[in-house]
């Protein structure tokens, strides 16, 4: 990229592209909730709450229609979920109970209940679910404005080219944007997995999120430039230099387009798959758009966490069937319920533990609650006939655990067949490798598992004994650390010795600084966020696996991550790939 000397602010590149335009500062009404005022008439307050919910629902219906028209039916479904939250029986019950029992006013009741659920999601470690907290805030803001008689800004009326500046861009805000006039987005909060980021990418509007204090660092109608890939905001842009940058970006985008609908094949004709990680059926459409060769991770817990009760067999069946039908010719790997740790449910109370991340969660929870596990397995079995299903169990630590889970799954599938319900004969049953013990025993696990999927997010944490959410020890979260590479090497060798394939669904799979190492280690399937697919394929298709095998042997003998990263950077530079 052309070098630009100016005042830069750094954020999270959340939607690729470059934009140059004057700023438009999103001015939202000040919401002040009186937490001291009580009510005299409970019945009137309940009616006021119900009217607020009805008004909010009507507005969300209109936004859903706008989003559907602009972005397609699947993106409109985001607001079906929002409507569901606004009308959630448990949340409404809690708000009414607060009004009835404590006589607090309607806005305060709304604030208390929505803040409670916001904290549930915000405290989660998984980035995908953590970002769902923004959806809760979006609906809370709309509910409070309706309860207080305030008006939210009308973004539909924008009629000049602008870069939108805001504290936080909600999904509702994003759905109202007109791509013709909103050329870019900068916000103080948010990340790549937020619905706002996802929808920005759908609209192909460049976005840089998480720019600290941006509202105090720019003025209205100030010319700015942003790079949504690099996460850069230039508050004093040299327009000529940025035009060069735009030309370079356009050239790169055209090059990436060549890698959307082609096979992933190395220069020495080694076939690997580049797949997508998804959290719901809507994400599958995004994965298809970017040329996925399957789904390497479908987080089934989305069905549980977006619900106010245990999802029924039919609800789950519809969700799994939808994805399998969309990705019909490629494998779809669905992870069984990975709940516990940071992922809580509003309708279930987990036991108090000193360290819940190492406690009662994932497969441990499922094996202890077989009625819940059975419902999910029945839904998976029924959906299996609609595509190429693979099931993987999370947090497997011992061979007995895996054998018990697999045996139970096969038992459930037999029950379905006896009931006259068809179940595919070729369902693959595998496991996640995210605990060092399972990596060390990979050659033994491979006798029973059909495949492995390496979950690097947890494997790195447990290998390095570091909490990646802790700022004080985050430096230990090192994907290319030689110790972690040896864990992966052990896993892949153990699987291949038993003719089993290995995928990876952690963030490392989409990191181009890890790509040549993983290719050299023999990884079969790379699964990542959909938008990372074309660039990952570009890297792989321009590499020779034998060269990568030599590279990784050298890396395995190094001592530090800095040495490994320098080695990879030099390798990719010589290949003219970075």
Image (cartoon, rainbow, N blue to C red):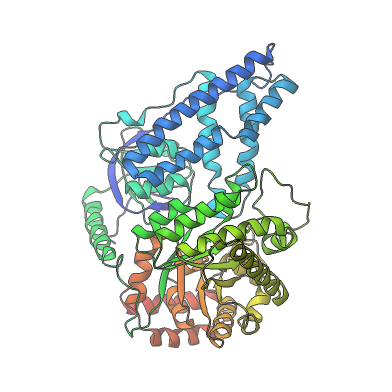
Residue at (37% x, 43% y) in the render: 185
**Front residue of this view, candidates 203 and 235:** 203
Residue 485 spot, x, y in % from top left: 55, 78
Taking the image as shown, residue 366 lies to the left or right of residue 24, namely right
Q: Quadrant of residue 36?
A: top right
Taking the image as shown, residue 484 lies to the left or right of residue 254, namely right
Residue at (54% x, 54% y) in the render: 317
Residue at (36% x, 56% y) in the render: 229
In the image, residue 521 above or below residue 462: below
Residue at (44% x, 22% y) in the render: 151
Q: Residue furthest top?
A: 40
**Front residue of this view, candidates 509 and 252:** 509
In the image, residue 318 above or below residue 486: above
In the image, residue 522 above or below residue 154: below
Q: How many marks?
A: 0
Q: Quadrant of residue 357?
A: bottom right
Residue 219 spot, x, y in % from top left: 37, 34
């Amino acid at each position: 990229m052309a070098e630009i000397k100016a005042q830069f602010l750094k954020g999270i590149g959340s939607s690729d592209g470059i934009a140059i335009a004057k700023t438009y500062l999103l001015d939202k009404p000040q919401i002040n909730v009186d937490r001291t005022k009580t009510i005299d008439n409970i019945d009137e307050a309940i009616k006021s709450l119900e009217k607020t919910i009805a008004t909010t629902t009507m507005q969300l219906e209109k936004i859903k229609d706008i989003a559907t028209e602009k972005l397609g039916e699947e993106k409109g479904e985001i607001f079906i979920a929002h409507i569901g939250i606004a009308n959630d029986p448990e949340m409404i019950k809690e708000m009414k109970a607060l009004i009835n029992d404590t006589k607090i006013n309607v806005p305060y009741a709304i604030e208390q209940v929505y803040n409670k659920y916001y904290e549930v999601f915000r405290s989660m470690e998984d980035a995908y679910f953590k970002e769902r907290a923004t959806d809760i805030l979006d609906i809370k803001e709309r509910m409070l404005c309706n309860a207080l008689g305030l008006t939210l800004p009308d973004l539909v009326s924008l009629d000049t080219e602008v870069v939108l500046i805001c504290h936080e861009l909600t999904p509702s805000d994003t759905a109202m944007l007109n791509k013709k006039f909103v050329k870019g987005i900068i916000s103080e909060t948010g990340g790549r997995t937020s619905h706002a980021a996802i929808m920005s990418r759908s609209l192909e509007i460049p976005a840089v999120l998480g720019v600290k204090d941006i509202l105090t660092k720019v003025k209205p109608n100030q010319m700015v430039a942003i790079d949504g890939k690099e996460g850069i905001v230039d508050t004093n842009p040299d327009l000529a230099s940025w035009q060069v940058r735009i030309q370079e970006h356009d050239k790169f985008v055209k090059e990436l387009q060549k890698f959307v609908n082609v096979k992933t094949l190395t220069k020495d004709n080694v076939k690997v798959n580049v797949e997508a990680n998804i959290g719901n059926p809507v994400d599958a459409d995004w994965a298809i758009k970017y040329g996925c060769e399957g789904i390497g991770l479908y987080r089934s817990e989305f069905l549980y966490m977006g619900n106010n009760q245990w999802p029924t067999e039919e609800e789950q069946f519809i969700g799994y069937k939808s994805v399998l039908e969309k990705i019909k010719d490629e494998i779809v790997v669905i992870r069984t319920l990975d709940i516990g740790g940071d992922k809580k449910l509003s309708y279930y109370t987990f036991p108090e533990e000193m360290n819940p991340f190492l406690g009662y969660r994932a497969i441990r929870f499922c094996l202890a609650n077989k009625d819940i596990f059975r419902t999910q397995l029945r839904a998976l079995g029924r959906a299996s006939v609609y595509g190429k299903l693979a099931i993987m169990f999370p947090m497997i630590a011992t061979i007995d655990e895996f054998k018990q889970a697999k045996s139970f799954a096969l038992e459930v599938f037999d029950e379905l067949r006896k009931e006259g319900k068809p179940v595919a004969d070729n369902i693959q049953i595998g496991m996640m490798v995210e605990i060092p013990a399972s990596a060390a025993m990979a050659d033994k696990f491979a006798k029973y598992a059909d495949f492995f999927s390496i979950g690097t997010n947890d494997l790195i944490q447990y290998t390095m004994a570091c909490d990646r959410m802790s700022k004080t020890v985050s430096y230990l979260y090192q994907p290319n650390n030689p110790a972690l590479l040896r864990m992966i090497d052990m896993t892949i060798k153990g699987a291949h010795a038993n003719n089993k394939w290995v995928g990876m669904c952690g963030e490392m799979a989409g990191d181009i600084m890890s790509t040549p190492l993983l290719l050299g280690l023999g990884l079969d399937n790379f699964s990542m966020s959909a938008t990372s697919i074309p660039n990952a394929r570009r890297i792989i298709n321009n590499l020779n696996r034998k060269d990568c095998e030599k590279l990784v042997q050298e890396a395995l003998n190094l001592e530090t991550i800095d040495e490994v990263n320098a080695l990879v950077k030099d390798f990719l530079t010589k290949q003219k790939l970075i």
